[in-house]
């Protein structure tokens, strides 16, 4: 098995606590993860909030689009077990440079704000820049982030396998290619490794799937139950 294999808590430890909440991130840290993955949108008042969907309907007791609500409106929502939707800074303060943080850019205009916050945490709070990985399905947004902060690692997200395998990741200047467990195969892993790219797989929760992925020699897995990894 890969020696530098990363156990990545998906949206914290989403199998144990409401996803993308402080409770979930605390749980992930207590389970000894190597990295924590989270998602960000810019809300109407301009802050970066940690939430996966473009709407609040699935994960809170509210409804409507994240981008249409200001921070105050988002803060009154229950994100499960009376948890609140956190700000990116609140999560970073909790993690405190202890593990890698994989910030997934979900909405538009996230690249610039994320780059400003990362810059601040490296400069003012002595974060190790190696503890940041910024990923996205939105490759133009990812490209923009890379332009703003070339020294920070990026992960290119994809749902399926393209004809040219991991070439897209190489072209983006990515550190990793992050793929769904549904599509991954040995050929893709080998091609990515040949190009010097890491392969991180989501979302792996079942023991037999974990074993399958290990056989493929992937570099890390995202899991809602990171202790199973």
Image: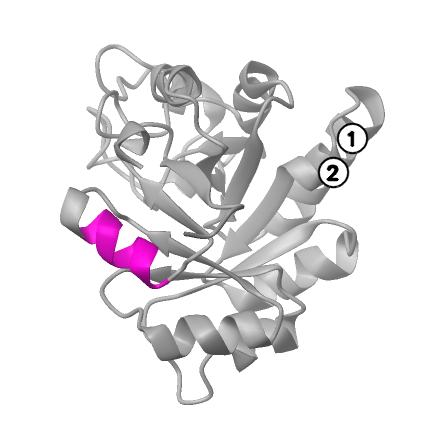
The x and y percentages for residue 12 are 38, 29
Residue indicated by mark 1: 122
The x and y percentages for residue 132 are 64, 40
The x and y percentages for residue 44 are 50, 36
From the viewer's perspective, is 208 left or right of 115? left
Residue indicated by mark 2: 129
- Residue 73 visible, this orientation: no
The x and y percentages for residue 49 are 48, 31
Specify start and end residues of the magenta stretch as a single range: 209-216
Q: At 76% across and 61% down in the image, what residue appears?
A: 147
Q: At 49% across and 47% down in the image, what residue appears?
A: 104
Magenta stretch: dominant SS? helix
Q: Is residue 214 above or below residue 60?
A: below
| Occupied quadrant, residue 222 | top left
- SS of the residue at dot 2? helix
Q: At 37% across and 47% down in the image, what residue appears?
A: 221
């Amino acid at each position: 098995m890969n020696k530098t294999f990363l156990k990545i808590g998906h949206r914290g430890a989403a199998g144990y606590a409401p996803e993308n909440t402080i409770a979930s991130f605390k749980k992930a840290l207590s389970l000894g993860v190597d990295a924590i993955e989270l998602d960000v949108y810019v809300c109407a008042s301009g802050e970066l909030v940690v939430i996966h969907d473009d709407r609040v309907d699935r994960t809170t007791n509210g409804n409507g689009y994240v981008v249409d609500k200001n921070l105050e409106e988002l803060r009154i929502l229950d994100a499960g077990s009376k948890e609140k939707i956190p700000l990116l800074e609140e999560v970073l303060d909790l993690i405190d440079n202890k593990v890698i943080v994989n910030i997934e850019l979900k909405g538009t205009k996230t690249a610039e704000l994320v780059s400003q916050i990362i810059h601040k945490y490296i400069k003012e709070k002595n974060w190790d820049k190696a503890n940041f990985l910024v990923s996205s399905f939105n490759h133009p947004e990812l490209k923009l982030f890379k332009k703003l902060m070339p020294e920070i690692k990026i992960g290119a997200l994809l749902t399926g396998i393209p004809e040219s395998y991991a070439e897209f990741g190489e072209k983006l200047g990515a550190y990793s290619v992050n793929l769904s467990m549904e599509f991954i195969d040995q050929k893709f892993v080998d091609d990515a490794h040949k190009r010097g790219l890491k392969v991180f797989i989501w979302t792996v929760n079942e023991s037999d799937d974990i074993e399958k992925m290990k056989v493929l020699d992937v570099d890390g897995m995202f899991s809602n139950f990171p202790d199973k990894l």
